[in-house]
Amino acid sequence: MTHPASASRPSAAVKILVVEDERDLALGIRANLEVEGYEVSIANTGEAVFAEVSRSNPDVIILDLMLPGMSGYDVLAQLRRDGSDVLVVILSARGEEIDKVRGFRTGADDYVTKPFGVMELLARIQALLRRRAAAPQMSPALAFARIGDATVDVTRQALIRDGQEIPLTPKELALLLALYRKADRIVTRQDLLREVWGYAGDVTSRTVDVHIAELRRKIEADPANPKHIVTVWRAGYRLRA
């Protein structure tokens, strides 16, 4: 891997945890990230991630899926169950759509397939960091958002429906609030990709559709015939709040 001189440097030290059992690859990723000004640590097993997260409190985790012992999917699921909203970029040779869907459903913020370019990885990380930095502060009016017979409790990152608390992943919550802020208006997939994932330009991805399907499963009485998150053909989505 070579150092991309054109990448912009972070304005402050950002901590990144590289979770990768291939030593040379992990060291190569760390070297490139450190040149860009990031503070980087490495974990080579899934079990080691939690001790490192507790020690260094990283801003971003670059997570391989095929790890000895605890898999990357299991690591990610446990992080989200523990309430961590750390940005997670899956970096894996498993490039099938089903693998990506599972990763996003489990709570990944992005998914990069091997082999990969360092410039692409850096751009993905920078986009995620920009999105998080630019995220608007939550107003009191959105602390509890009412959608049909469900209430979104932002502080608890959960959906309350029929007296049951249904956890939301960080991305599901961000996507739901992005739709809520534009309730009853059409929001395109590209708008949602830019606002929630930080992408710019024309990005072809089913990422939004996957997350919308998960939100419908949690919100709608009949996800196959949604009443609240509706598809506007050839345009995008609209939330009927």
Image (cartoon, grey):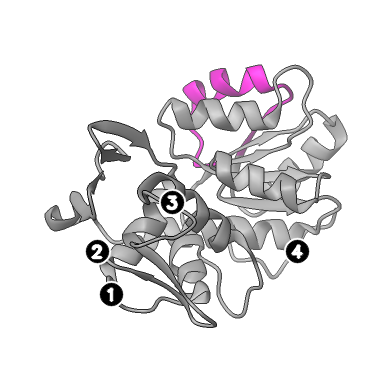
Seen in the picture, residue 96 relative to 65 is either above or below; the reply is below
Q: Looking at the picture, how far across and down is residue 33, in whole percent?
A: 68, 49
Q: In the picture provided, is 118 more to the left or to the right than 142?
A: right
Lower sequence index among marks 4 and 3? 4
* Category of crowding for the residue at label 1, using alpha-carbon neighbours closer than 10 angstroms: few (below 14), some (14–19), many (at least 20): some
Dot 2 corresponds to which residue?
241
State the residue at coordinates (60%, 66%): 8
Dot 3 corresponds to which residue?
215
Residue farthest toward the left in the current orientation of the protein: 140
Q: In the picture provided, is 51 more to the left or to the right than 81?
A: right
Residue contact at pointers 2 and 1, CB within 8 angstroms: yes
Dot 4 corresponds to which residue?
4
Circle 2 or circle 4, nearest the eye? 2
Residue 184's disc is: 1
* Category of crowding for the residue at label 2, using alpha-carbon neighbours closer than 10 angstroms: few (below 14), some (14–19), many (at least 20): some
**Range of residues picked out in magenta:** 40-60
Q: Looking at the picture, how far across and down is residue 186, in whole percent?
A: 38, 79
Q: In the structure shown, which secondary structural element does the residue marked by tag 3 occupy?
A: helix
